Image (cartoon, rainbow, N blue to C red):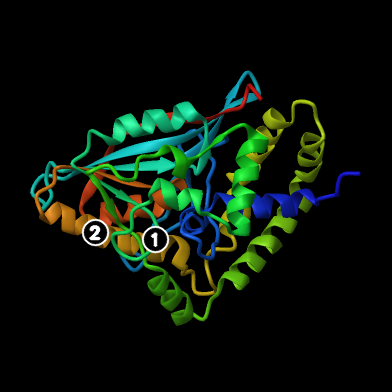
Amino acid sequence: MRPQIHPRLFVVFFCIAFGSVCAHRSALGQDTTAEAFRDNSSEPDRKVGGGSEAAGEKPAEVELYVRVVDDKGQASALQTATATFRGREGTPYAGRMVDLVGVVHIGEAEYYETLNERLQSYDSVLYELVAPDGTRIRPQDLEQRRSFLASMQTGMKDMLNLEYQLEKIDYLADNFRHADMSPDEFAVDMERRGDSIAKMVARMMGAGLASSAKTGGDASMLLALFSPNRSKLMKRSMARQLVDVETVTAGFDDANGENTLIKGRNAKAFEVLKDELNKGKKKIAVFYGAGHLSDMAHRLEVDFEMVEVKIDWLDAWDLTRN
């Protein structure tokens, strides 16, 4: 007899399995945490309330960089965005281009093939990895993974017939540069605010239970688990729930509206971005989990005096097939 898993808890675990800290730190045999995703399927202009601490105050609205696309009322794809920013005339970085390349950490093989091709064209690709400065992800690191969450991630990708980002992206490319906190920096920032992974997960679970009561999302998840078309239905259900703004972001901010997972790591990444721009790089990609991009976009606009000039979308999940 199959064990009964509460679908909402399953989603929480899946959020953790998708996490950029989880994805990268588990590859190195370390502890893990969670990642954010956002949806714009019901908002054509991709904007909701939100903010960033980059300029010391929150903007009135932010753009979203993950969406579920519908075809005749049926979910057809989960997509991530690449947003192109250019420096305004008369500013220190006038004419420079910075692309925010959003990614999800489990996706179709074709999705990662396309990303690999696109990332070759940049002068520099700044990537996320909670690890000591300069750490690269090598094939042998993935082969040596033994953590519980690493095993869970592998099981999840197999269940959904998807691929794992770390196994498909070429992190040894010459133009890749590490741009993230070290584990010590991550821990110190959490401690500074009196926060912890346990507290964050507890907040996420509380938000998930509240969302479940409001939306009734557990039923579709439970049906998907035991369907002959499990992969397709699970992808559809999880795509919708993982990009539920209220559910997946409620647990990140502490009582003061700060968090290490998104805002703290983004601040560190943009220190590296500033260094690359000051070296004269003209075309730079910031290759991060899509949940980071709203805050990053605000930082580019306020701190770097750049403006978004273009946005492209790429299918990460095909929601029409198993």
| Disc 2 residue crowd, few under 14, some 14–19, many 20+, Cα 10 Å | some
- Residue found 60% across the figure and 48% down from its top: 153
Q: Is residue 141 left or right of residue 146?
A: left
- Residue found 48% across the figure and 58% down from its top: 21
Q: Where is residue 142 in the image (x, y as percent from the top left)?
A: 48, 49
In the foreground, 134 or 96: 134
Q: Is residue 64 visible?
A: no
Is label 2 in contact with label 1 (beta carbons under 8 Å)?
Answer: no
Q: Point out the image quarter for the C terminus.
A: top right
Q: Where is residue 289 in the image (x, y as percent from the top left)?
A: 44, 48
Q: Is mark 2 on a helix, strand or loop?
A: helix
Q: Position of residue 187 (x, y in %)?
A: 45, 75
Q: Position of residue 109 (x, y in %)?
A: 49, 29
Q: Is mark 1 on a helix, strand or loop?
A: loop
Q: Can residue 28 be seen in this view?
A: yes
Residue 67 is marked as none
Amino acid on which the number 1 mark rests in the picture: Ser
Residue 52 is marked as 1
Q: Point out the image quarter for the N terminus.
A: top right
The answer to which image quadrant residue 81 occupies is top left
Q: Is residue 71 left or right of residue 59?
A: right
Which residue in the protein does label 2 denote?
A: 272
